[in-house]
């Protein structure tokens, strides 16, 4: 009888433990391979929680200083560079992007409607990802993609509809390159990463060997490595190779291929590094007594350019296959605002109705977020690897794992 009682008790304890684990969706779902959560305020990091392995093959444990491909949070960081160039008088948010690119950028269904840098940054350009966005190889031209009719939403004029489109940001990077004559990854190091003291890079080329050796390997939901399984070193080619397989960056030409260094998702940065970006937003463009941006530039980024109402945009990202509506409901210049009090919006993983600002990231089995509450002066960074493509299991449009990390 005593043995039977002990077995029953153990079964109940195991059932309770399983119930406490956040679901990640589907019969093959599992806990993340690794996860990190860093909380911060205007003065610095206030709490850190780290779990799991950065590299399963070597058994290397994750740390909050390990760089990870942070996916679409890269867009927010790219826009910090844009705003520095705007402040320097090298770019104009409302100028015709055709003039900035040096060739005509027009939706063929609306040839009279100019497309501006502001529309590209806020996903209201009328471009889509249906023709691709990252496949332009070394030596190729991004212009070839936008000349594909599939690249355009021919039902909605520029400025009238929100469609989250990765292709916008290679065009933004191309504009940055043409305005400065500098390669995008080097430009972002000079404008943003180095001034903030962040050991990060776009597509590994500008990261030093020690930083690259700590790369977080990205795993899919089945635990298979899908990105940055670099065996402790930089990849042989940091960009999509040329058509002949070569990887010589020396012939690079400004304004030809803004997709090379993945401005839409290719930033490698640690959770602690990302917390510095969050602190910059909390500080209205200033951190640790150093000003990177004017408060007006930060305000321009965080002010929603689009607010969801029925018929004026898509509330999910088509490219990921994650068609769970209600994820995007307010969007500025590469800055998302959460907890939109509108029917159909499910953009509150915290569940407290606070209008935090920041950006999410999801690619190659990673789910990530950078969110700040400017009223309370606090923020949080998280990411989890080994996740499914869809955000599943949550009460909001975010995953159950992310909702757990939010708290």
Image (cartoon, rainbow, N blue to C red):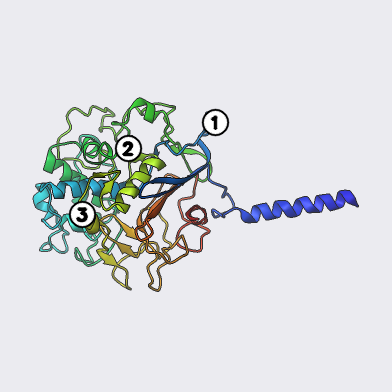
Is residue 246 or residue 171 the one in the foreground? 171
CA gap, disc 3 to disc 1? 43 Å
Instruction: Judge whether 23 appears above or below 185 on screen.
Output: below
Mark 2: give few (<14), some (14-19) or many (20+) Cα within 10 Å: some
Instruction: Judge whether 221 appears above or below 332 on screen.
Output: above
What residue sits 51% from the left and 63% below the top? 395
Q: Position of residue 279 (x, y in %)?
A: 34, 48
Question: In the image, 272: left or right of 205?
Answer: right
The picture quadrant where one finds residue 288 is top left
Question: In the image, 388: left or right of 267?
Answer: right
CA gap, disc 1 to disc 2? 26 Å
Q: How many marks?
A: 3
Q: Any mark on residue 247, and which?
A: none
Q: Position of residue 118 (x, y in %)?
A: 19, 57
CA gap, disc 3 to disc 2? 21 Å
Q: Position of residue 354 (x, y in %)?
A: 40, 64
Residues tagged 3 and 1 counted as in contact (Cβ below 8 A): no
Dot placed on the residue nearer the N-terminal end, 3 or 1: 1
Dot placed on the residue nearer the N-terminal end, 1 or 2: 1
| Residue matched to label 3 | 297
Mark 1: give few (<14), some (14-19) or many (20+) Cα within 10 Å: few
Judged by depth in the image, the label closer to the viewer, 1 or 2, is: 2
Instruction: Judge whether 199 appears above or below 154 on screen.
Output: above
Is residue 227 or residue 289 the one in the foreground? 289
Please, what secondary structure does the residue beneath circle 1 have?
loop
Can the viewer see residue 74? yes
| Residue matched to label 1 | 59
Q: Any mark on residue 198, and which?
A: 2
Residues tagged 1 and 2 counted as in contact (Cβ below 8 A): no
Q: Position of residue 334 (x, y in %)?
A: 28, 54
Please, what secondary structure does the residue beneath circle 2 have?
loop
Question: In the image, 12: left or right of 265?
Answer: right
């Amino acid at each position: 009888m005593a043995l039977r009682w002990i077995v029953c008790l153990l079964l109940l304890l195991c059932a309770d433990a399983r119930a406490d684990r956040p679901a990640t969706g589907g019969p093959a779902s599992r806990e993340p391979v690794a996860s990190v959560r860093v909380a911060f305020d205007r003065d610095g990091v206030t709490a850190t929680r780290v779990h799991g392995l950065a590299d399963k093959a070597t058994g290397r444990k994750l740390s909050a200083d390990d760089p990870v491909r942070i996916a679409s949070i890269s867009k927010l960081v790219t826009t910090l560079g844009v705003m520095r160039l705007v402040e320097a008088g090298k770019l104009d948010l409302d100028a015709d992007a055709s003039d900035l690119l040096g060739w005509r950028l027009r939706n063929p269904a609306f040839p009279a409607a100019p497309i501006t840098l502001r529309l590209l940054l806020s996903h209201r350009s009328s471009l889509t990802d249906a023709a691709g966005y990252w496949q332009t190889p070394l030596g190729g031209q991004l212009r070839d993609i936008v000349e594909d009719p599939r690249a355009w939403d021919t039902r909605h004029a520029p400025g009238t509809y929100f469609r989250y489109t990765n292709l916008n940001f290679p065009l933004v990077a191309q504009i940055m390159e043409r305005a400065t004559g500098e390669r995008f990854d080097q430009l972002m190091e000079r404008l943003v990463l180095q001034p903030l003291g962040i050991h990060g890079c776009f597509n590994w080329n500008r990261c030093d060997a020690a930083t690259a050796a700590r790369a977080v390997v990205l795993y899919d939901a089945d635990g298979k490595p899908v990105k940055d399984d670099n065996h402790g070193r930089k990849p042989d080619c940091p960009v999509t190779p040329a058509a002949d397989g070569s990887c010589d960056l020396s012939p690079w030409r400004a304004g030809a291929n803004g997709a090379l260094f993945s401005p839409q998702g290719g930033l490698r940065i640690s959770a602690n590094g990302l917390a510095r970006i969050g602190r910059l937003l909390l500080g209205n463009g200033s951190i640790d007594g150093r000003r990177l941006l004017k408060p007006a530039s930060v305000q321009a980024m965080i002010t929603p350019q689009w607010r969801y109402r029925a018929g004026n945009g898509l509330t999910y990202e088509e490219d990921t296959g994650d068609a769970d509506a209600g994820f995007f409901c307010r969007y500025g210049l590469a800055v998302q605002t959460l907890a939109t009090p509108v029917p159909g919006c499910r953009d509150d993983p915290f569940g407290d109705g606070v209008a935090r600002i920041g950006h999410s990231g999801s690619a190659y089995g990673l789910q990530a977020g950078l969110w700040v509450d400017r009223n309370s002066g606090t923020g949080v960074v998280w990411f989890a690897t080994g996740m499914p493509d869809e955000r599943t299991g949550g009460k909001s449009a975010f995953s159950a794992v992310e909702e757990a990390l939010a708290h």
